Image (cartoon, grey):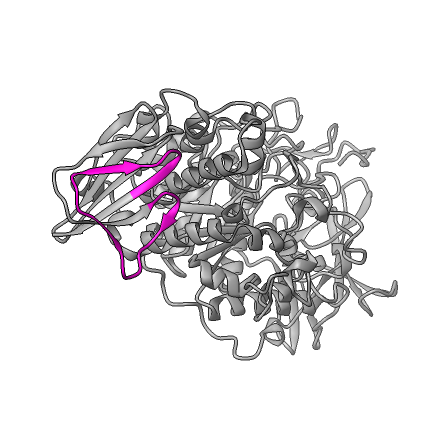
């Protein structure tokens, strides 16, 4: 704490370094101070228990406000019930009352803070709020959805709550809100389905929502003044108020987020929550640093903050109470909000033990909850062998990693301003590498990533970060006409969607979403980030193509095998050179040939058998009857396209 000036050399028994104002984290610190007691508020209509872990404090008071936004408050001293853990019980029904904690440090310095474990807040996270969570449940709020079939059956669609409906072209009334996301009957300018109806038509199984916990840099009372994706955490266990119809009412944001999840579940769509436990927006003002300065954030021996995240701080998941915070938080979201999966931002910052503990914790609730994350190997102050990075994936079974290796091979690197090219844009010698990646962990080079099973690999070509695929193609191939650019785009999507593993689609990818060439739009206005549903009108053929690929994948388990043993048995790569990739899928009843042509002109392939039905050809999918049949032993695969043949055995 930079504002603490210690005047006394008396340590009491509090482990503060009087020179730095940081806790002295010794090897036995967690053994001495960590607690497994439930933290935060434990509410009942008769009484509420307040419990805070704050090992830096000499004493703590509860500040209980008379009204949500007024200044008058009652100050109640808390008792240190075990080293570093403070508690007080207050009788009466405190539902919807605001509170904070006042912390006294050993030298008499005083600072107040919100509750890091808070489930509700006032506007802009200024105060924590006690809530009767039962009162926030929507009508007919029931149990979790039944367990999902298998992780490789998932088709994930990444969207942003605000972006999804903020444009007038969405046809939504509650634009940019939780409730807007689930409005039914909304139409594009040309009268086509948008919003929830559109997602149902598309056939995805999971929607992955970018940060929807309480983030810091959007004013919840002036929601259109400033844009941010939300990777700037403030209150991890509280829904974001700018997505609610009334940010000043603590219960509204909770109820409306639950309504959104309920609406998606009713539509058969599961919800993956994007969580950002790897850093906070501002360490000095965050409750983590106020209650335990120097503990929750990873530091070097000189006290400086580790910065593998690139935003100034890395949380120390290897410390027991940070690990426990993550576990408590995902458990809360899964149980209270019925969340079906968690996407860990910069997962490589965390340690392997913590991520495995997340898997174990969620398995007790529902083993089909999906865990995926960015397994980048980041420069954080943690030994390489402990990082939850893709290189160590063999130690994190049933946790998926974004497969940037195939993404880069398909379209080129995103790390050079978008100028690198890939298979779809003319870069040579990418064929074999893509084919290896499409095999979902089978034969995967363990010195690159430790994937063991297809449920550890997220296959994608575009996400919210970096240029959209369309914008990258504009940069890479500026002389292409729109037809050629579109064909390259559709080829890229098919390479990912038909691969073994977990397919992932960025919202609007199916209608060639553009952000006007902007590479990093995290704080750019709605005009750049919005989903332009009029583009869904003009790119209807492209939408139908991706919809068809999704239906094809869902139609036969050969496209979504669950183990590498199954892949070895049923999938064989036949050719991978000269901008061509060919493989077959086969079991006792079905035979598929899959051809990817990265050349601009057609390629011809001989096949030993005839009487195949043509399911995908020339940027069209036809898996409905009547189908086109191939009655020769030669197939023509058009330039920049995918062809899929099928035969019943």
Above or below residue 510? Residue 435 is above
Q: Give residue 280's position: percent from left, percent from top.
A: 66, 41
Relative vertical location of residue 220 with respect to residue 437 in this rendering, above or below: below
Q: Nearer the viewer, residue 593 or 26?
A: 593
**Residue 528: quarter of image:** top right
The residue nearer to you, when weighing 592 against 556, is 592
Measured from the top left, where is residue 324 in percent x and y? Answer: 52, 48
Residue pushed farthest top?
A: 428
Q: Magenta span covers which residues?
A: 617-643
Q: Is residue 297 above or below residue 228?
A: above
Q: Identify the residue shown where x is 38% and y is 53%.
A: 548
Q: How many marks?
A: 0
Residue 639: in magenta span: yes
Question: Would residue 639 be seen by someone viewing this image from the given angle?
Answer: yes
- Report the front residue among 227 and 593: 593
Residue 28 or residue 155, whichever sits in front: 155
Instruction: Decide if residue 7 is on the left or right side of residue 244.
Output: right
**Do we see residue 561 in this rendering?**
no
């Amino acid at each position: 704490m930079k504002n603490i000036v210690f005047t006394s050399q008396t340590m009491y028994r509090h482990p503060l370094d009087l020179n730095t104002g940081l806790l002295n984290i010794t090897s036995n610190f967690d053994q001495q101070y960590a607690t497994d007691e439930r933290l935060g508020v434990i509410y009942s209509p008769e009484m509420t228990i307040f419990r805070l872990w704050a090992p830096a404090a000499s004493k703590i008071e509860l500040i209980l406000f008379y009204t949500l936004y007024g200044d008058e408050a009652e100050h109640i001293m808390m008792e240190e019930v075990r080293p570093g853990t403070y508690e007080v019980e207050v009788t009466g029904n405190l539902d919807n009352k605001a509170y904070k904690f006042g912390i006294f440090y050993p030298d008499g310095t005083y600072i107040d803070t919100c509750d890091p474990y808070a489930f509700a807040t006032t506007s802009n996270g200024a105060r924590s709020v006690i809530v009767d969570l039962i009162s926030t449940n929507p009508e007919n709020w029931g149990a979790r959805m039944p367990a999902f079939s298998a992780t490789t059956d998932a088709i994930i669609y990444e969207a942003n709550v605000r972006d999804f409906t903020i444009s007038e072209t969405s046809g939504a009334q509650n634009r940019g809100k939780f409730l807007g996301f689930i409005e039914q009957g909304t139409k594009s300018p040309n009268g086509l389905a948008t919003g929830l109806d559109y997602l149902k038509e598309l056939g995805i199984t999971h929607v992955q929502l970018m940060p929807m916990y309480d983030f810091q840099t959007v004013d919840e009372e002036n929601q259109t003044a400033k844009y941010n994706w939300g990777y700037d955490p403030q209150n991890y266990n509280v829904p974001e108020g700018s997505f609610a119809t009334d940010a000043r009412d603590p219960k509204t944001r909770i109820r409306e987020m639950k309504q959104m999840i309920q609406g998606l579940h009713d539509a058969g769509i599961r919800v993956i929550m994007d969580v950002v436990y790897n850093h906070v927006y501002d360490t000095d003002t965050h409750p983590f640093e106020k209650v335990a300065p120097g503990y929750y954030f990873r530091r070097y021996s000189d006290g400086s903050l580790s910065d593998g995240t690139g935003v100034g701080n890395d949380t120390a998941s290897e410390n027991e109470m940070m690990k426990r915070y993550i576990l408590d938080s995902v458990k809360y979201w899964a149980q209270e909000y019925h969340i079906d999966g968690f996407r860990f931002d910069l997962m490589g910052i965390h340690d392997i033990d913590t991520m495995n503990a997340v898997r174990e914790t969620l398995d007790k609730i529902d083993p089909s909850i999906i865990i995926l994350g960015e397994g980048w190997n980041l420069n954080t102050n943690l030994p390489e062998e402990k990082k939850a990075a893709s290189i160590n994936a063999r130690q994190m079974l049933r946790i998926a990693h974004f497969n940037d290796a195939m993404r880069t091979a398909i379209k080129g690197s995103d790390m050079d301003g978008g100028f690198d090219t890939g298979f779809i844009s003319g870069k040579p010698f990418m064929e074999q590498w893509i084919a290896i990646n499409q095999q979902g962990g089978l034969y995967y080079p363990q010195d690159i990533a430790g994937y063991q099973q297809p449920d550890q690999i997220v296959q994608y070509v575009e996400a919210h970060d970096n240029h959209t695929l369309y914008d990258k193609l504009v940069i890479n191939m500026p002389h292409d006409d729109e037809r050629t650019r579109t064909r390259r785009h559709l080829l890229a999507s098919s390479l990912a969607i038909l691969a073994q593993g977990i397919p992932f689609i960025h919202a609007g990818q199916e209608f060639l979403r553009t952000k006007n060439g902007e590479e990093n739009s995290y704080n750019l206005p709605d005009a750049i980030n919005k989903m332009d549903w009029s583009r869904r009108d003009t790119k209807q053929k492209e939408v139908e193509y991706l919809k068809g690929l999704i239906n094809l994948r869902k139609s036969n388990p050969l496209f979504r095998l669950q183990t590498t043993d199954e892949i070895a048995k049923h999938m064989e790569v036949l050719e991978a050179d000269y901008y061509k990739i060919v493989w077959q899928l086969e079991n006792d009843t079905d035979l598929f040939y899959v051809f990817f042509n990265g050349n601009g002109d057609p390629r011809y392939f001989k096949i030993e058998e005839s009487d195949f039905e043509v399911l995908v050809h020339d940027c069209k999918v036809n898996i409905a009857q009547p189908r086109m049949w191939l009655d020769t032993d030669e197939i023509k695969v058009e330039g920049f396209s995918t062809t899929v043949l099928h035969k019943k055995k």
